[in-house]
Structures are given as C-alpha cells and as structure tokens.
Image: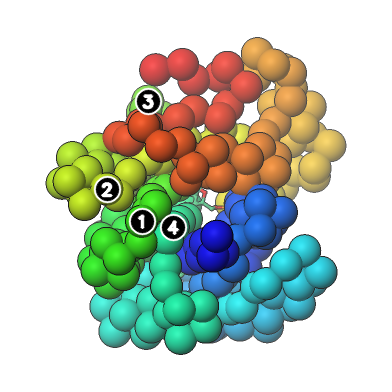
Amino acid sequence: MTKKTVLITGGARGIGRGIAESFLQADYNVMIADLDSGGPWRYQLSNETELADTSSELASLGTIHYVPVDVTQDDSCKACVKATIEAFGGLDVLVNNAGIVDSGVIDEFTEDRWDRIFEVNVKGIFLMTRAAVSELRRSSDAAIVNTASIAGKRGAPRMAAYCGSKFAVVGITQSFALELASDGIRVNAICPGMVGTAMWHDHLMSNTGNNEFESRMSQIIPLGRSQTVQDMGEAALYLANARNVSGVALNIAGGYEMH
Ligand code: NAD
C-alpha cells in the first residue's frame, strides 16, 4: 500500500503540531502549513521560522515537509496544495486547523477584528477546501477534518465573533459532508475543549501561568484535566480513518460539552 498524505493548516504549533505528530506516528506523509510571518493580531501568530523548526523537530518521526500559507488568500491556498502534490504526489486528508481567537464586549469590538475572525476561521476553510477538493477526489480514501470548537456548540459572553465563527465551521462541515459524500470524501470536525496553547496563554488568560490554567480547568472539566494537543491528534486521526463516519462534530472536552 502507498503511504497516505495529510496537509495540516496551522501546523507550526499548538493543536496543529499535535495533529502532525499523530499522523506521522501513523506513517502518513505530512505537510504542515502556516503563516510566513506572525502578522498583526491580538497575540503573536506563528511564522516561517517556527514552521521550519517544527518540521525539523518532527522529522525523526517520519516524512514531513512544510509550506507557508495564508488561508485567507486564494492564491496562497492553491500554492499550498500544489506544493503538497509536488512533494508527495497526491493528497488524501486535509486538516483545516488554522484559526484565531478574540474576545471582548460588543460595544468595543471593532469591525476589523470581527471580519478577521471570520476571514481566517470560516473563509479560510472554504478557500483551502476548494483548492484541495479536486486532488482529494483522486484519492481512494479521502477525508477532511475541520477544527471547530466547543465554542461552536454553545455561546459565551464576550465571545460572539469566535463562537459565531465556530458554529459556522460545524455548519460548513455538515454541508460539505453531504455535498462530497458521493465523491467518497468524508468530512468531520473536532471540537477541542480547553487546550493550553497560545490562544489561552497569550490572550484568553494572558496574565496567568500554566499552573493556574490547569488548576482552573481541572475544577470545571468533569474528567479533571485540560485537553492536550495529543488528545486532538488522536481524534483527528480517528476521524480521518473512520470509514463510515461523516458530518460529525466530535467534542474532545473531558465531558465539559456533550451537545
Ligand atoms: P495556535 O494559535 O497555537 O494555533 C493556530 C495556528 O493557526 C497558528 O500557528 C497560527 O499562525 C495559524 N494561523 C492563524 N492565522 C492563519 C492564517 N491566516 N493562515 C494560516 N495559518 C494561520 O492555537 P491552537 O489552540 O493550536 O488553535 C488551533 C485550532 O484549534 C484553531 O482553529 C482554534 O480555533 C481551535 N481551538 C483551540 C482551542 C484551545 O483550547 N486552544 C479550543 C477549541 C478550538
């Protein structure tokens, strides 16, 4: 059997990096894609140096390459898919994981911040999927895994833009699942709970350290701990390989969200 190939956006760090590790351990060819420069946002995003470093650090686990991408730009999405095909000869799994968070009361939330959240978290999935779908159709075992969130299952104060964008990801996942089923492409989403990445440590709980994050999460999460990037990798790998599962938005949240 030929090795399968996965393309993971937002793969330089955090959950995307955890997903890359799981697919490498399952002997996939892995392409990680992320921004070439951190760009202006409410906290530092990733950049090409971190992307290259992640690729070298994970190389001991298997075959991995990297490519810069901005998922909000159509040309960049197309170039990212082209680079994947050039590197590995095909594409079997697309993981739309790139995303950003923001929070704030409605009176002070600017239009620019609202638009950027939707550009990255929602339009980014559309553009990447459109760029990749003809290659996925050529695979005999194709799947798409979108990173939604438990914020796509339940609203939260000061989180309207982020929650709205993640509800959209769940709707897009269901719609693509139905549209692409006849092509044999399964489309599912993971809904992470609380994972201690840059989103939490550099923005949502920026004044607190890892210990305080873990202590707060262990009090509110039924299974008693925050989620890890490995938990997310395990779930994404399961959904990529579940032959008769499509349209699911799977909570990985230690029982915190059950809807
Ligand atoms: P993170 O900030 O470490 O990772 C997000 C990655 O996306 C970064 O590397 C960033 O550079 C990249 N990115 C941002 N804009 C991009 C763009 N325009 N093009 C390409 N890449 C871009 O945070 P994370 O927690 O690992 O987030 C990964 C995904 O998980 C996101 O979709 C996020 O919404 C989702 N999520 C996270 C949590 C959590 O608790 N951390 C919970 C639920 C959902």
The span from disc 1 to disc 3 (Cα, nearest Å) is: 35 Å
Any atom of ligand 1 within 8 Å of the CB at mark 2?
Answer: no
Of callouts 4 and 2, which one flags the residue occurring earlier in the amino acid sequence?
4
Q: Position of residue 1 (x, y in %)?
A: 55, 60
For label 4, count other residues whose C-alpha is less than 10 Å away and answer few (under 14), some (14-19) or many (20+): many
Q: Which mark is residue 154?
A: 3
Q: Is residue 216 visible?
A: no
**Above or below for 77 versus 193:** below
Q: Which mark is residue 185?
A: none
- Viewer-side label of 4, 2: 2
Q: Which mark is residue 140?
A: 1
Towards the viewer: 142 or 216: 142
- Viewer-side label of 3, 2: 2
Towards the viewer: 251 or 133: 133
The span from disc 3 to disc 2 (Cα, nearest Å) is: 30 Å
Q: Position of residue 211 (x, y in %)?
A: 84, 37
Q: Quadrant of residue 14?
A: bottom right
Of callouts 3 and 4, which one flags the residue occurring earlier in the amino acid sequence?
4
Of callouts 1 and 3, which one flags the residue occurring earlier in the amino acid sequence?
1
For label 1, count other residues whose C-alpha is less than 10 Å away and answer few (under 14), some (14-19) or many (20+): few
Towards the viewer: 238 or 17: 238
Q: Which mark is residue 184?
A: 2
Marks 1,2: beta carbons within 8 A: yes
**Above or below for 235 versus 35:** above
Q: Tag 3: residue type?
A: Arg
**Total number of numbered discs in the rendering:** 4
Any atom of ligand 1 within 8 Å of the CB at mark 4?
Answer: no
The span from disc 3 to disc 4 (Cα, nearest Å) is: 28 Å
Q: Which mark is residue 93?
A: 4
Q: SS class of the residue under badge 3?
A: loop
